[in-house]
Amino acid sequence: MVNKFTNIKERVVLIAKKQSISQEQFFHSIGMTSANFRGKAKETPLNSKAIVNIITKYPEVDLYWLLLGEKENQQANVVNEPGLEYKTIHQTCEEKDEIIAMLKNQIQDLKTDKEDLKKLLGLAQGKK
Protein backbone atom coordinates (compact mmCIF):
# COMPACT_ATOMS: atom_id res chain seq x y z
CA MET A 1 0.00 0.00 0.00
CA VAL A 2 1.39 3.40 -0.99
CA ASN A 3 1.36 6.09 1.68
CA LYS A 4 -0.28 9.16 0.15
CA PHE A 5 1.06 11.38 2.92
CA THR A 6 4.60 12.64 3.14
CA ASN A 7 6.50 11.84 6.27
CA ILE A 8 5.93 14.42 9.03
CA LYS A 9 9.67 15.04 9.25
CA GLU A 10 9.72 15.83 5.52
CA ARG A 11 7.09 18.48 6.21
CA VAL A 12 9.22 19.88 9.03
CA VAL A 13 12.15 20.14 6.61
CA LEU A 14 9.88 22.04 4.20
CA ILE A 15 8.98 24.44 7.02
CA ALA A 16 12.66 24.86 7.87
CA LYS A 17 13.49 25.75 4.26
CA LYS A 18 10.87 28.50 4.23
CA GLN A 19 12.24 30.25 7.30
CA SER A 20 14.53 33.28 7.19
CA ILE A 21 17.03 31.40 9.36
CA SER A 22 19.26 28.46 8.54
CA GLN A 23 17.90 24.95 8.80
CA GLU A 24 20.34 24.26 11.65
CA GLN A 25 18.99 27.25 13.59
CA PHE A 26 15.42 26.15 12.87
CA PHE A 27 16.06 22.60 14.09
CA HIS A 28 17.78 23.97 17.19
CA SER A 29 14.78 26.27 17.85
CA ILE A 30 12.45 23.25 17.97
CA GLY A 31 14.82 21.30 20.23
CA MET A 32 16.25 18.98 17.60
CA THR A 33 19.24 18.65 15.28
CA SER A 34 19.47 18.18 11.53
CA ALA A 35 20.59 14.59 12.18
CA ASN A 36 16.99 13.83 13.25
CA PHE A 37 15.90 14.61 9.69
CA ARG A 38 18.37 12.48 7.72
CA GLY A 39 18.77 8.80 6.95
CA LYS A 40 16.92 6.28 9.08
CA ALA A 41 16.18 8.92 11.74
CA LYS A 42 13.96 10.64 9.18
CA GLU A 43 11.59 7.66 9.30
CA THR A 44 11.11 7.86 13.08
CA PRO A 45 8.19 9.78 14.61
CA LEU A 46 8.47 13.43 15.53
CA ASN A 47 8.22 13.93 19.27
CA SER A 48 5.36 15.94 20.71
CA LYS A 49 7.70 18.51 22.26
CA ALA A 50 9.04 19.37 18.78
CA ILE A 51 5.46 19.74 17.49
CA VAL A 52 4.60 22.07 20.37
CA ASN A 53 7.76 24.10 19.69
CA ILE A 54 6.91 24.37 15.99
CA ILE A 55 3.37 25.59 16.49
CA THR A 56 4.42 27.92 19.34
CA LYS A 57 7.43 29.50 17.64
CA TYR A 58 6.04 29.38 14.10
CA PRO A 59 2.29 30.07 14.47
CA GLU A 60 1.87 30.50 10.71
CA VAL A 61 2.38 26.74 10.31
CA ASP A 62 -0.89 24.92 9.65
CA LEU A 63 -1.03 22.28 12.38
CA TYR A 64 -3.47 20.16 10.40
CA TRP A 65 -1.10 20.12 7.43
CA LEU A 66 1.90 19.44 9.68
CA LEU A 67 0.27 16.38 11.22
CA LEU A 68 -1.64 14.96 8.25
CA GLY A 69 0.03 16.40 5.18
CA GLU A 70 -3.12 17.90 3.73
CA LYS A 71 -5.10 21.09 4.00
CA GLU A 72 -7.89 21.16 6.54
CA ASN A 73 -11.38 20.81 5.12
CA GLN A 74 -12.92 24.11 6.21
CA GLN A 75 -16.44 22.82 5.57
CA ALA A 76 -15.95 20.02 8.07
CA ASN A 77 -14.92 22.43 10.80
CA VAL A 78 -17.99 23.08 12.93
CA VAL A 79 -16.23 24.18 16.07
CA ASN A 80 -16.51 27.93 15.45
CA GLU A 81 -19.68 28.22 13.43
CA PRO A 82 -22.77 26.01 13.57
CA GLY A 83 -23.56 24.25 10.34
CA LEU A 84 -26.81 24.31 8.41
CA GLU A 85 -28.04 21.13 10.09
CA TYR A 86 -27.69 22.72 13.56
CA LYS A 87 -29.49 25.87 12.42
CA THR A 88 -32.32 23.81 10.92
CA ILE A 89 -32.71 21.75 14.08
CA HIS A 90 -32.59 24.90 16.21
CA GLN A 91 -35.30 26.55 14.10
CA THR A 92 -37.36 23.37 14.27
CA CYS A 93 -37.08 23.38 18.07
CA GLU A 94 -38.26 27.00 18.21
CA GLU A 95 -41.21 26.12 15.97
CA LYS A 96 -42.05 23.17 18.19
CA ASP A 97 -41.93 25.41 21.28
CA GLU A 98 -44.35 27.84 19.60
CA ILE A 99 -46.71 24.98 18.67
CA ILE A 100 -46.58 23.61 22.22
CA ALA A 101 -47.44 27.03 23.66
CA MET A 102 -50.34 27.39 21.21
CA LEU A 103 -51.64 23.92 22.06
CA LYS A 104 -51.45 24.66 25.79
CA ASN A 105 -53.59 27.75 25.21
CA GLN A 106 -56.10 25.72 23.21
CA ILE A 107 -56.27 23.09 25.94
CA GLN A 108 -56.94 25.78 28.53
CA ASP A 109 -59.67 27.27 26.33
CA LEU A 110 -61.27 23.83 25.90
CA LYS A 111 -61.20 23.23 29.65
CA THR A 112 -62.93 26.58 30.18
CA ASP A 113 -65.53 25.74 27.51
CA LYS A 114 -66.11 22.36 29.15
CA GLU A 115 -66.75 23.98 32.53
CA ASP A 116 -69.11 26.48 30.92
CA LEU A 117 -71.01 23.64 29.23
CA LYS A 118 -71.28 21.75 32.51
CA LYS A 119 -72.76 24.82 34.15
CA LEU A 120 -75.22 25.32 31.31
CA LEU A 121 -76.24 21.67 31.40
CA GLY A 122 -76.62 21.82 35.14
CA LEU A 123 -78.88 24.85 34.81
CA ALA A 124 -80.86 23.15 32.09
CA GLN A 125 -81.25 20.00 34.20
CA GLY A 126 -82.29 22.08 37.22
CA LYS A 127 -85.15 23.70 35.23
CA LYS A 128 -86.77 20.40 34.40
Image (cartoon, rainbow, N blue to C red):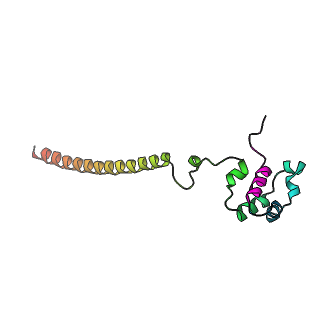
Instruction: Identify which residue is drawn at 81% across, 60% down.
Output: 23
- Relative to 11, does residue 55 appear above or below in the rendering? below
Percent x, y of residue 97: 38, 51
| Quarter of the image where the N terminus is located | top right
Is residue 14 on the magenta stretch? Answer: yes
Q: Which residue extends farthest left?
A: 127
Q: Position of residue 28 (x, y in %)?
A: 83, 64
**Which residue range is magenta in the image?**
2-19
User: In percent of the image, x 68 and y 46: which residue is there?
Assistant: 70
Where, quadrant-wise, is the C terminus in this rendering?
Answer: top left
Residue at x 82%, y 51% (from the top left corner):
45
Q: Quadrant of residue 51?
A: bottom right
Depth check, front residue: 100 or 24: 24
Camera-nearest residue between 127 and 95? 95
Residue 24 position, x and y percent, is: 83, 62
Q: Is residue 37 left or right of residue 105?
A: right
Q: Where is residue 108 shown, x and y percent of the image?
A: 28, 51
Answer left or right for 86 relative to 43. Answer: left
Q: Dividing the picture into quarters, in which one does residue 48 lie?
A: bottom right
Q: Count of labels shown?
A: 0
- Does residue 115 show up magenta in the picture? no
Given residues 82 and 16, the one toward you in this image is 16
Which image quadrant for residue 12?
bottom right
> On screen, 22 above or below 112?
below
Furthest residue toward top: 1
User: Is residue 70 left or right of 103 when viewed as pictured?
Assistant: right
**In the depicted view, which residue is nearer to us: 47 or 27?**
27
Secondary structure mostly taken by the magenta-highlighted segment of the chain: helix
Q: Say which residue appears at 69% left-offset and 57% top-offset.
A: 61
